[in-house]
Every structure is written in structure tokens, then in C-alpha cells.
């Protein structure tokens, strides 16, 4: 029998086991719209959207998808920054019985083409600025229809008239799309499509709500299959962890990207489920965030360490009142203790570190917001979530504080990887998800991550997989060998560094390699540092010793201090 020493740390307000409503995810939007029809759900750059308006918009979008031929189980992609349209599209797809495919707006054509082809998405909802990128790959993917929206579509008058001029100045591009053929405009849809409720038979525990792409061992991202039940159960866990929060009364700062599973669950889904007002931030700009906190007085601010660090280091911090913030759950990367302490002094609220993975919807562990917390620890498993550390050699649970692989079991654990039965079989065994993260547990049931998943780099909250970056750089004609590693960075957590061996007799600059990388990689994946070498450290059989390079960097940094 699995021992659960962490349960003794639970405050009496958090049940050790929860009741889960076995309902499709969009049913919670309908409930909230019925209970709080005129309450503001989303605030976006001066524009308010009530829960009733949000539900009706989502229904119109769902009905239009049906007109386009979308059936239960079909994949529909969203390539948008945080915006009302992203929320409308998300729930509209689910109401139509579709599966959401979240797509990072920073993706290059190469990355977009791969994801659309792998997921088999038939329709994509994208920002007007991204329309040229989408059309460039449409014919080489299963995409049949493109639905376009602009930031201006949900701005109040007169901002909606002024914004196109600002956009042209900022991006030097004006995209005009007509509503005809396989191109569709969201404003037209929301004006002309009926808001009729749809009868779609969804099994929450079996049917997928989401394909969320994450890096794979092959270097190609893989689609994590999350069911309605996976996402609902994890959101209910969050709700109980935030036991002091009041239904219908909290204000959430929506700064985390909704296309990231953490922002989706901890902000978008939770906000709708609990009737919170979400202050939508289309991108993270420090002064905009500070102004929004002072003006809108959010009580909840889920985020990543880089966000809190950026706010604390802003020279104008003292000019703003952040005292409305009651609770922050930090994810995506380790939270430095000094950042936690300083942020709590500035706000008067609580900031704690959590842990999770795309495969777990995402949260599995967290320190208690109102209760005992342990510095340096990811906290304790959430209700109905089992976790243990097993030996890499024997697969048996280790004793004491011995280090092994962290494995997890719970209702939030994914169904598997899309079209990858072999990788699913490796990661999911006997109901347990093998995280690939090395960890240990103390006697009280608090867990500690010793090493992040294999060679993954976490920079600014983004997961970056070296193999993917390396494969792009290998395509550069002047490169003979390359290895990419994450090196410590005080601001981003880690930063990407590429060690390059050039082909014999050629000359090359860092700028040339960088320009090539930027053609094929999203900006956050592009190496920040390059180092040219005559050779790379290798094993006897020729495998590049990535760890040796990381140790070099650590030693170099230690000597500088």
C-alpha cells in the first residue's frame, strides 16, 4: 500500500479526496453564464465581456464550425495571443465537439507546418498578423479553413479605429482578409451565426478536449492527449488549493499565455469555472502589468518566476500599489527563495512554487498557499494525486531521501501521446506516469526536483528541447557539428548556448549562424550565445558529452564570482 506522508500537512480546509463532476469542460461555461449572466468575465484593453456574452459568442463560433463540417473529434487549432477571441475559440471548439490544438503564435512556418500536419487540424483561428504565415503552410497540411481575427475586433470605440494605425507602425504590415472561400472573419461569424445550443454526446473521461504539444525525445514535439476529465479534475484541485478564494468574487490577472497548459488551466478554465473576472494581458510587458494591477486590483496572479523577477527589478515598482494580490501560484521553472520573499513583502500576498507537466494537465504538486511550505521544495502532491520516487535500475520505490525518477498517478494524468503508442507505453506504465525528472522525498512527504527532465532547457518559462535547435543548426551549410545546452541565467533561469564546430576551411560569424536560426525557430528557442570550437568533448563511441560542457560553464561562472 502506498504511504502518503504528505496528507498530514494538509490544512483541514483541503480534503484529501475530492468529488469530481463528470461533465464536459464547456458545461462549466454554461453554468457560470446561467448563474452570473451579467457579471464581467473578461476585461481586455478597456472592453468588458460578460459571461452571458462569452457563452453566446462561443455558441456562435461552435455553430459556424459545424457549418464548416467540423464533427466530434475533429481538431481545430488556435494561434492567438491572450485575447477574448482565444477564449471564445477555445470554448466554441469544445461546444462543437472538437479537440483544441493550441499553437504558439511565435511558431515559424516550419514549426507550424509540423504541428498542423501531425495533429490533422482542419481549421485554424489565427491573428490577422499571422495570416501570411498560416497561408504559406496551408496547402502542405490538412488545413481546410482559416478563421481570422484582429486585436481591434474586441477593442472599445475609439480604440478599435486607432489600433490599425498603431499596428502598422509597430509591425509595418497591414493584413486585409475577405470573408469568402476558405477564409473567414470572426466578426462576421459572431454577428451572423446563431447562438443555438448544440447536442454533442461527449464522454468526459474518454473524449479528448485538447492536444497540447510538448517536446519529444525524437526532437519533434508530440501531442499530449488531455481529456475533458483530465482538465476538469486538475482545475477542481486548483480551486480547493485556493480554499480562501470566493466564487464569483476574485479578479484574476491573465498574464500567463493561454496557449500554455498552465495558463489555460490555472487562469482560463479556473476563471470560467469559478466566475472570476479575468484581466487579459495580450503580452507580458512589465509596466503594462504594473498599471493593470494598480487599476484593476487583481487578487490572483498565477505566473512564472521570470514574471515576478521582472516586476521586482523594474525601477518604477515603488510607484505602484500591488497590495490587492492575495495569492500567486508559480510554475514553469524553479522559484528562487529571494524572489518569493521579496514579492510577498511588496504585495502582502502569498507566492508559492508548484510543479507539473503538460502530461498532467499540468499541476501535480505545490507548496501550501495558506499552510506549511518548504523552501527549495516543489511541495506536496495534490488531492487524489499519488507520487513516488523509484530507482532507475530496479523500478522499485527508493527509501529515505534517495534520488530516483519521480512518477505520478492521478485523474489529471494524460491519456497518452497522439499517434505515438510506443512513447505512450514508455511513459505510462500500470497507471503511473514516468516524468523523467530526478527527485527525492523527505520524511514529511515534501518533494524536491534534483535535475530537470533530461536535457530540457527552461528559459523564461518556455520549454526548449536542444535536439530541435540542433537539427535546425545542422542544416546550416557551414556547420559540421553542434551541441546545444542550457546554461544558468539570473533572469531567464537558463539561456540557450550553442557550441559549433565549422566545416574545415570555412569562416563564419555568430551573426550568420544566428540569422539562419531565426528563419526556422521561434525567437525563444534561438541561442543567445554561440561558441566556436575545433572539436566537442565525446565518449569513446562518439556521443557528444553535453554534461561536460555544462560543467565547464558552471566552473567558469564560479571562477568569475
Image: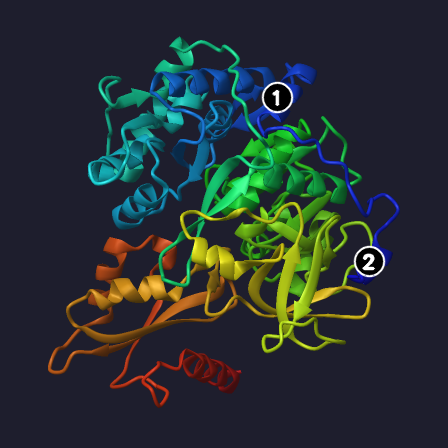
Within 10 Å of disc 2 (Cα), the crowding (few <14, some 14-19, many 20+) is few
Measuring 40% from the left and 18% from the top, which residue is drawn there?
A: 66
25 or 469: nearer the viewer: 25
Residue 527 visible, this orientation: no
Mark 1 and mark 2 residues within 8 Å of each other at the beta carbon: no
In the rendering, at what x and y percent does residue 115 appear?
34, 45
Q: Nearer the viewer, residue 17 or 40?
A: 17
Q: Is residue 363 above or below residue 254?
A: below
Residue 369 or 162: which is nearer the viewer?
369
The residue wearing badge 2 is 372
Query: Is label 1 in a helix, a strand or a loop?
Result: strand
Kind of element beneath mark 2? loop
- List x then y, in percent, for residue 290: 57, 42
Give whichever of discs 1 and 2 has the lower sequence position: 1
Q: Looking at the picture, how far across and down is residue 120, in whole percent?
A: 34, 38
Would you say 125 lies left or right of 520 here? right
- The answer to which of 352 and 403 lies nearer the viewer is 403
Quarter occupied by residue 150: top left
Q: Quadrant of the N terminus?
A: bottom right
Q: Residue 500 appears at what percent x and percent y?
A: 27, 76
Q: Nearer the viewer, mark 1 or mark 2?
A: 2
| Name of the residue lying farthest toward the right | 12
Q: Residue at x 50, y 87 (%)?
A: 559
Residue 124 in the figure: left or right of residue 92: left
Which label is found at residue 338?
none
**Residue 97 makes an appearance in the image:** yes
Q: CA distance from mark 1 to mark 2?
A: 34 Å
Extreme residue toward the left, this view: 505
Which label number is shown at residue 40?
Answer: 1
Residue drawn at 22 percent across, 19 percent down: 181
Amino acid at each position: 500500500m502506498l504511504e502518503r506522508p504528505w496528507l498530514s500537512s494538509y490544512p483541514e480546509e483541503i480534503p484529501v479526496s475530492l468529488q469530481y463532476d463528470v461533465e464536459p469542460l464547456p458545461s462549466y461555461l454554461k453554468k457560470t453564464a446561467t448563474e452570473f449572466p451579467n457579471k464581467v468575465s473578461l476585461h481586455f484593453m478597456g472592453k468588458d465581456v460578460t459571461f452571458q456574452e462569452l457563452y453566446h459568442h462561443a455558441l456562435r463560433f461552435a455553430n459556424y464550425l459545424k457549418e464548416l463540417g467540423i464533427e466530434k473529434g475533429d481538431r481545430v487549432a488556435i494561434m492567438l495571443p491572450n485575447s477574448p477571441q482565444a477564449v471564445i475559440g477555445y470554448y466554441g471548439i469544445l461546444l462543437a465537439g472538437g479537440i483544441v490544438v493550441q499553437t504558439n503564435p511565435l511558431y515559424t512556418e516550419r514549426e507550424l507546418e509540423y504541428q498542423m500536419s501531425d495533429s490533422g487540424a482542419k481549421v485554424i483561428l489565427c491573428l490577422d498578423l499571422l495570416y501570411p504565415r498560416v497561408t504559406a503552410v496551408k496547402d502542405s497540411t490538412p488545413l481546410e479553413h482559416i478563421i481570422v481575427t484582429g486585436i481591434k475586433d474586441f477593442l472599445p470605440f475609439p480604440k478599435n479605429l486607432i489600433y490599425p494605425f498603431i499596428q502598422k507602425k509597430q509591425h509595418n504590415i497591414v493584413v486585409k482578409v475577405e470573408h469568402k472561400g476558405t477564409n473567414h472573419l470572426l466578426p462576421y461569424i459572431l454577428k451572423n451565426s446563431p447562438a443555438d445550443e448544440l447536442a454533442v454526446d461527449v464522454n468526459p473521461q474518454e473524449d479528448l478536449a485538447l492536444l497540447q504539444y510538448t517536446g519529444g525525445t525524437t526532437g519533434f514535439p508530440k501531442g499530449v492527449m488531455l481529456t475533458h476529465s483530465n482538465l476538469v479534475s486538475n482545475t477542481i484541485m486548483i480551486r480547493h488549493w485556493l480554499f480562501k478564494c470566493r466564487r464569483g468574487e476574485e479578479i484574476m490577472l491573465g498574464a500567463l499565455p493561454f496557449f500554455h497548459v498552465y495558463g489555460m488551466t490555472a487562469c482560463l478554465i479556473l476563471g470560467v469555472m469559478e466566475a472570476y473576472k479575468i484581466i487579459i494581458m495580450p503580452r507580458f510587458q512589465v509596466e503594462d502589468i504594473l498599471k493593470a494591477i494598480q487599476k484593476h486590483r487583481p487578487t490572483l496572479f498565477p505566473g512564472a518566476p521570470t514574471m515576478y523577477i521582472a516586476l521586482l527589478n523594474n525601477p518604477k515598482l515603488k510607484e505602484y500599489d500591488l497590495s490587492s494580490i492575495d495569492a500567486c501560484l508559480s510554475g514553469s521553472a524553479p522559484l528562487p527563495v529571494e524572489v518569493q520573499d521579496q514579492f510577498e513583502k511588496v504585495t502582502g500576498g502569498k507566492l508559492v512554487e508548484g510543479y507539473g507537466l503538460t502530461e498532467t494537465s499540468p499541476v501535480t504538486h505545490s507548496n501550501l498557499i495558506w499552510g506549511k511550505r518548504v523552501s527549495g521544495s516543489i511541495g506536496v502532491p495534490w488531492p487524489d494525486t499519488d507520487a513516488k520516487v523509484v530507482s532507475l535500475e530496479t523500478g522499485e520505490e527508493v527509501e529515505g531521501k534517495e534520488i530516483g525518477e519521480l512518477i505520478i498517478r492521478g485523474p489529471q494524468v494524460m491519456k497518452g501521446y497522439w499517434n505515438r503508442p510506443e512513447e505512450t507505453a514508455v511513459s505510462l506504465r500500470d497507471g503511473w506516469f514516468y516524468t523523467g525528472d530526478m527527485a527525492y522525498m523527505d520524511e514529511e512527504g515534501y518533494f524536491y526536483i534534483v535535475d530537470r527532465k533530461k536535457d530540457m532547457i527552461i528559459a523564461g518559462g518556455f520549454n526548449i528541447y536542444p535536439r530541435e535547435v540542433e537539427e535546425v543548426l545542422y542544416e546550416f551549410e557551414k556547420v559540421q557539428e553542434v551541441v546545444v545546452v542550457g546554461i544558468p541565467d539570473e533572469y531567464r533561469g537558463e539561456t540557450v548556448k550553442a557550441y559549433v564546430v565549422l566545416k574545415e576551411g570555412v569562416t563564419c560569424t555568430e551573426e550568420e549562424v544566428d540569422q539562419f536560426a531565426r528563419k526556422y525557430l521561434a525567437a525563444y528557442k534561438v541561442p543567445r550565445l554561440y561558441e566556436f570550437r575545433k572539436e566537442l568533448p565525446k565518449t569513446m563511441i562518439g556521443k557528444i558529452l553535453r554534461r561536460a560542457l555544462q560543467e565547464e560553464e558552471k566552473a567558469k561562472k564560479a571562477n568569475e564570482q
